[in-house]
Image (cartoon, rainbow, N blue to C red):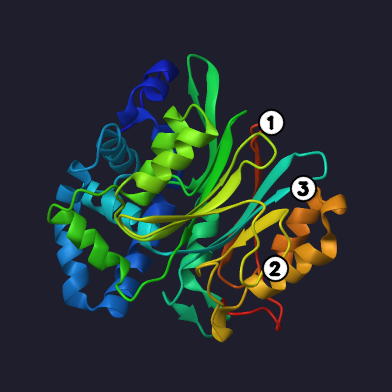
C-alpha cells in the first residue's frame, strides 16, 4: 500500500508514522527477518520459535497505543505481515548486547555513549568471520527525530521497523540507553510469559514512553525502577545536571540503582559509570570482559580530558568494539544532541564479542 501523498497525514497518524522510511527499508527488513527466523529456530529449537511465530500477530495487538497501529503501518509500507513485523520487534527486544558509559566532565556536563552489539550466537559466517545478523542490521540503522507541534520531543538511534527505543535523548532533560541483562532463561521464554497474560511491559516500550512523556530526571528514574518489566535489563540514565546519572539494574519486578559518584567492585573512579551486560557488584566472566578494558581506558583518559571525541575513542577501542558492534552513539542530554556511526571490526585481533 503506497504512503499518503500529504506529509501531514503520514507524520501525524501512527499508522503512517514510519511509512516513507519503510517503503525504502522493506527489502532489508524482509532479509533480516528471514535470517532471524532461520537462526532463532536453530538456537531455541524449532518448536519454541514456531510457537512465538504463530502467535506473533496476536502479540502485536496486545501492545499499548500507538504501537500496534505503528506495526500495522510498517507492515503495509514494507509489504510484510503484521505478525512478521511483530516478530522482528520481539527480536529487537531480546537480543541486545551492549556497552554504555555515562561520564561527567570537570564543568559538570554529562556525556553519554553506547555501543550497540547485536546478534550474539545468531549465525557466524566462517568465510568472512562476521555475525550475519550484525551485517544485516547495519543497512537498517537509522537516527530518528520525533516531534510534536513542530517541536522536537526526542531523538533516537535504532533500526528501521522498530517501534520501541534502545538509545534516545529528550532534549534538555535526559538520555537513556538499554543493555541486556543475561539470565538462565532465554528471552523468548519471557516473551511467552507476557503472551500468556503476565502484566509486564516491554523494555523498549517503556523507554519510548518515558522519552515521549518524561518531565524530569527524578520521575523517569522512579518509573524505570518500579515498572514491572518483561525481562531483566539495565537502564543507563543521564540527566542535565551534575550528578544526575545512574545504572538501574532490573529484574522483572525489583531494581538496584547505582548512582554516579559511587565506586563498584571493578571500577574505583567515581566520575563515570560503565555498564556492559553483567551486574556491577560482580566480576564479569573471563570469556566476555569488556568492562575491564573499558574501565582502564576511562581511567587513563581522566576526567579533565573528557570530551565527546575522547569518549568515542574509548567506545572504539577493542574489545569494547568487537565483531558484534553495529553502531556507536554519543548523546548529550543538556543539548539534546545525538550522533551515531556504523561500526565495523574486521582486524585479525578483533574479538568475536
Residue placed at 67% from the left, 78% from the top?
350
- Coordinates of residue 191 in the picture (x, y in percent): 24, 59
Q: Quadrant of the N terminus?
A: top left
Compare marks 2 and 1 and give the one earlier in the sequence.
2
How many marks do you count on the picture? 3
Which image quadrant is residue 263 in?
bottom right
Label at residue 308: 3
Tell me the residue at 18%/60% (across/down).
Answer: 193
For the residue labelled by badge 3, is the local secondary structure a helix, a strand or a loop?
helix
Sort mark 1 into few (<14), some (14-19) or many (20+) by Cα contacts within 10 Å: some
Q: Are marks 3 and 1 in contact (CB under 8 Å)?
A: no
* Residue 255 visible in the shown view: yes
SS category of the residue bearing label 2: helix
Q: Residue furthest top?
A: 149
- Residue 288 place in picture, x, y as percent: 56, 79
Measuring 59% from the left and 65% from the top, which residue is drawn there? 325
The image quadrant of residue 46 is bottom left
Indicate which disc residue 222 carries.
none
**Quadrant that contains the C terminus:** bottom right
* Residue 341 versus residue 189 in the image, above or below: above
> Mark 3 to mark 1: distance in Å?
13 Å
Relative to residue 162, is residue 187 depicted above or below? below
Residue, disc 1:
335
- The residue where tag 2 is placed is 294
Amino acid at each position: 500500500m503506497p504512503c499518503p501523498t500529504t506529509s501531514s497525514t503520514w507524520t501525524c497518524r501512527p499508522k503512517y508514522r514510519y511509512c516513507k522510511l519503510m517503503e525504502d527499508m522493506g527489502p532489508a527488513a524482509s532479509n533480516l527477518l528471514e535470517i532471524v527466523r532461520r537462526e532463532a529456530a536453530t538456537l531455541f529449537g524449532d518448536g519454541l520459535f514456531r510457537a512465538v511465530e504463530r502467535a506473533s500477530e496476536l502479540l502485536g495487538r496486545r501492545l499499548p497505543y500507538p504501537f500496534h497501529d505503528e506495526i500495522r503501518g510498517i507492515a503495509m509500507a514494507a509489504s510484510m505481515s503484521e505478525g512478521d513485523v511483530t516478530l522482528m520487534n520481539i527480536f529487537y527486544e531480546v537480543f541486545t548486547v551492549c556497552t554504555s558509559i555515562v561520564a561527567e566532565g570537570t564543568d559538570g556536563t554529562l556525556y553519554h555513549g553506547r555501543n550497540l552489539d547485536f546478534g550474539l550466537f545468531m549465525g557466524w559466517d566462517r568465510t568472512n568471520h562476521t555475525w550475519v545478523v550484525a551485517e544485516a542490521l547495519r543497512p537498517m540503522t537509522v537516527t530518528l527525530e520525533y516531534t510534536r507541534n513542530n517541536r522536537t520531543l526526542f531523538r533516537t538511534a535504532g533500526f528501521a521497523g522498530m517501534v520501541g527505543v534502545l538509545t534516545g535523548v529528550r532534549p534538555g532533560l535526559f538520555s537513556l540507553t538499554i543493555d541486556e541483562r543475561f539470565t538462565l532463561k532465554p528471552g523468548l521464554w519471557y516473551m511467552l510469559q507476557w503472551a500468556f497474560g503476565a502484566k509486564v511491559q516491554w523494555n523498549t516500550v517503556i523507554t519510548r514512553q518515558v522519552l515521549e512523556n518524561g518531565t524530569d530526571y527524578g520521575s523517569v528514574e522512579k518509573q524505570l525502577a518500579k515498572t514491572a518489566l518483561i525481562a531483566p535489563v539495565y537502564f543507563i540514565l543521564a540527566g542535565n545536571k551534575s550528578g544526575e546519572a545512574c545504572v538501574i539494574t532490573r529484574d522483572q519486578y525489583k531494581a538496584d540503582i547505582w548512582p554516579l559518584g559511587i565506586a563498584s567492585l571493578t571500577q574505583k573512579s567515581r566520575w563515570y559509570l560503565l555498564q556492559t551486560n553483567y551486574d556491577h557488584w560482580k566480576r564479569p566472566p573471563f570469556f566476555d570482559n569488556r568492562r575491564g578494558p573499558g574501565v582502564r581506558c576511562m581511567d587513563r583518559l581522566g576526567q579533565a580530558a573528557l570530551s565527546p571525541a575522547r569518549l568515542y575513542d574509548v567506545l572504539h577501542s577493542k574489545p569494547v568494539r568487537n565483531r558484534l558492534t553495529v553502531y556507536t552513539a554519543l548523546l548529550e542530554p543538556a543539548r539534546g544532541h545525538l550522533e551515531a556511526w556504523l561500526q565495523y571490526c574486521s582486524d585479525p585481533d578483533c574479538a568475536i564479542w
